[in-house]
Amino acid sequence: MQLHDVKVHPSKSKLAREDQLAWKIAGVAADKVAVPRDVADMIINRVIDNASVAIAAINRRPVVSARDMALGHARKDGATVFGVAAGKRVSPEWAAWANGTAVRELDMHDTFLAADYSHPGDNIPPILAVAQTMGRSGRDLLRGIATGYEIHMDLVRAICLHEHKIDHIAHLCPAQAAGIGTLLGLKQEVIYQAVQQAVHVSFTTRQSRKGEISSWKAYAPAHAGKLAVEAVDRVMRGEGAPSPIYEGEDSVIAWMLDGPDAHYQVPLPEAGEAKRAILDSYTKEHSAEYQSQALIDLAFRMRERIADLKAVKSIVLHTSHHTHYVIGTGANDPQKMDPKASRETLDHSIMYIFAVALQDGRWHHVDSYAPRRAGRRDTVELWHKIETREDPAWTKRYHSRDPNELAFGARVEVTMNDGTVLTDELAVANAHPLGAAPFARADYIHKFRTLTDGIITAREANRFIEAAEELPRLPAGELHRLNVTLPAGTLVIGKPGIF
């Protein structure tokens, strides 16, 4: 890996194209390096993972709306839509929209946390949609996805968005555009312009994840994917983009991030170096914000030591800055303590999540968020006894570049009415690569079968898993096999709109 200095430059300096971050990103995307076997295997895992959570969410309202919008843009040689028979295709940007929403709705696919947040699995829907539309092979798809993950995660390692209240799709969209560029074998110049367009149109605010969180939380990465497909389409036709998009005196760093005096160091693979970033990401075993994964496992463990939850006086979670201020009491969001809050808000409330995990000893992607479950009197009482506090030691671990020190957990302190204090801590979730039970292929398949049980047939489940495991060998024109179809008549149709 090579570190690239990124700073704001006045227009009069005429920063050379070769010195711009977008050009360097495009160079990585255009580099025709092979995909290592372990990277290919992990991509297969994440294709399975995405399908799991997409089908589990297939008839939830935001997914239904996105699917219905996509079906209004039929294209004979287009891309498939989750749940819909593979013979029915739509324009790729709308498939990216529908499938990206389905993947994101339950907040249960993969994650990478560093200087900023990310769900790099969001790269897969638009890259796959373009691959299907353009008749590409499984090998092409692997290369495109490897690039999407690499660029996305490298930006997340270096540039913090959330402290400036910018939503994290600002790193996702250029990565998706770069991945599509790799997939199609585009020249560096073309990818460069696509990346710049993608950056320019994808800077939005974090209000999508603040206060009363709405269905837009699921739509946001799908919207990025749609924008990325459109950006690549435009530049393939010869169109350009605002430049330099990162370093310009009136561009994103100068006015939306660290300002004119900003200095970032972005790591990117050197020429000829394999794109291996996906191996540093991690999926979710539980349907909740990633920073709650270890805490759910910790709650399961703690409940064995608490004989009577009604005798709990208070619970303090000592954790990182991010956890405290994003999903903890440090966010100062009253909605995070409201039993009538939306599912999207509840899965960003570690107080709610920890209370339910303590009481139930399980976590379910539907039942754990049901309005009746959230409104239980004993749950509300326990929930309101929980607070978070930032601990500098956990914040340091959260930002560590040492994979053996990097952690997203907490230390819990439970005070009972009789004065007894129980403590425990967990650094990483059980499913994390360094956890007690790291996810492997069998776990991804089990997750798929569990989440899709009763929604698709066993025959369809077996067919999809077989196709996914054959991904590196799928010939051109056969990527529609990576779609998952529901039985006829089981897809919900939503309210009519314009399309």
Image: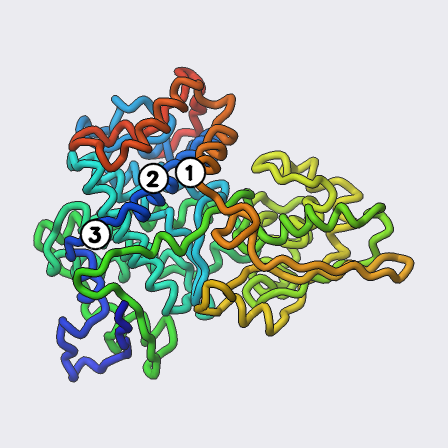
Instruction: Give the x, y percent position of residue 326.
Output: 56, 61
Quickly name the residue at label 2: 44
Quickly name the residue at label 3: 231
Q: Which quadrant holds residue 467?
A: top left
Instruction: Give the x, y percent position of residue 351.
Output: 67, 54
Q: CA distance from mark 3 to mark 2?
A: 27 Å
Query: 193 above or below 399?
Result: above
Answer few, some or many: residues within 10 Å of disc 1's Cα (few below 14, many 20 plus, some between 14 and 19).
some
Between circles 1 and 3, the one closer to the viewer is: 1
Q: Which quadrant holds residue 261?
A: bottom left
Identify the mark nearer the N-term, 3 or 2.
2
Query: 401 above or below 491?
Result: below
Q: Which mark is residue 441?
A: 1
Please name the residue shown 22% across and 33% down the image. Answer: 473
Q: Secondary structure at mark 3?
A: helix
Where does the C terminus fall, quadrant-wise?
top left
Q: Is residue 439 left or right of residue 363?
A: left
Question: Is the residue under label 1 in contact with that under label 2 (CB below 8 Å)?
Answer: yes
Q: Secondary structure at mark 1?
A: helix
Where does the N terminus fall, quadrant-wise?
bottom left
Q: Is residue 72 visible?
A: no
Please name the residue shown 30% across and 68% down the image. Answer: 267
Instruction: Give the x, y percent position of residue 496.
Output: 40, 29
Kind of residue at badge 1: Arg
